[in-house]
Amino acid sequence: MKNHRRILVVDDEPQITRVLRTTLTAQGYDLRVANDGETALEIMKDWTPDLVITDLVMPQMDGLELCRRVRAKAEMPIIVLSVRGEERTKVRALDAGADDYVIKPFGMSELLARVRANLRRTAVDEPEDAGVFEEGDFRIDTGAHTIAICGREVRLTPKEFNLLVYLSRHPGKVVTHRALLTAVWGSNATEQPEYLRVFVRRLRKKIEPDAASPRYILTEPWVGYRFEPSPIKRS
């Protein structure tokens, strides 16, 4: 069954690319493979993937630089594969623009679940829930996948958008770390607090007048975050 979703796999390990090619193609995805970051960028000049899966350590151009280069031009989800499981490496990858991080060796069922989760929009984006949120400085159109702040349109990646939409459904209320992780990344991500820290930081850089002194996304220490679409004006 062909689903026509395009996936670009970037990895210099032939065994990994062979397994991913076989498995993802069998699932109906339109697949292309690159052995390094530079080749991946060449492919993307004429062929735009819906999702990128990249290794972290590669010759010529590593996965971090590839994430930065892709994210500078496009918003499709990026899944990083790596044998390195320490938090600082995950944070570096997420800071570079990755949406998810899978540690090698991984189970194929887990990876396929991550692929599906990153390709589909969360429940807040499904047609029956599509609508327009207008409050305070914000106008969020979940159907059109657009956001405007004080009339200025802001471009967000799918994960950033889903995170903001979920927060916007609970204005003025504290949303716990666990609730956010489950809603945006799935139940398997509840033990990945670094995901939230990085993505909230990324969101603040894009939507806050001053990311160092946030007005819209407020931190509730040890608990979660609170979204204030109509911030109190500071004198």
Image (tube, rainbow, N blue to C red):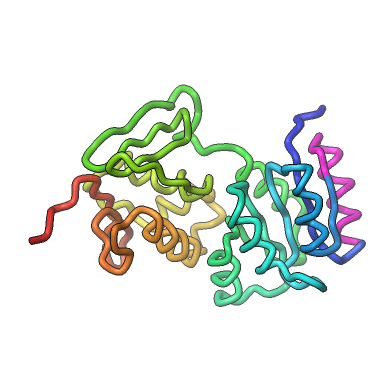
The boundaries of the magenta stretch are 15-31
Q: Does the magenta stretch include residue 1?
A: no
Q: Measured from the top left, where is residue 29 in percent x and y?
A: 79, 38
Q: Measured from the top left, where is residue 136 in percent x and y?
A: 21, 41
Q: In this view, does 1 lie to the left or right of 86?
A: right
Q: Which residue is drawn at 60% across and 37% down?
A: 120
Magenta residues: mostly which secondary structure?
helix
Q: Does the magenta stretch include residue 21?
A: yes
Q: In which quarter of the image is the N terminus?
A: top right
Q: Looking at the rendering, which quadrant does residue 72 occupy?
A: bottom right
Q: Looking at the rendering, which quadrant does residue 132 occupy?
A: top left
In the image, farthest residue toward the left: 235
Question: Who is closer to the viewer here, 62 or 106?
Answer: 62
Q: In this view, does 92 lie to the left or right of 23?
A: left
Q: Residue at x 34, y 55 (%)?
A: 176
Q: Measured from the top left, where is residue 138 in percent x and y?
A: 29, 40
Q: Is residue 93 above or below residue 140?
A: below
Q: Looking at the rendering, which quadrant does residue 30 occupy?
A: top right
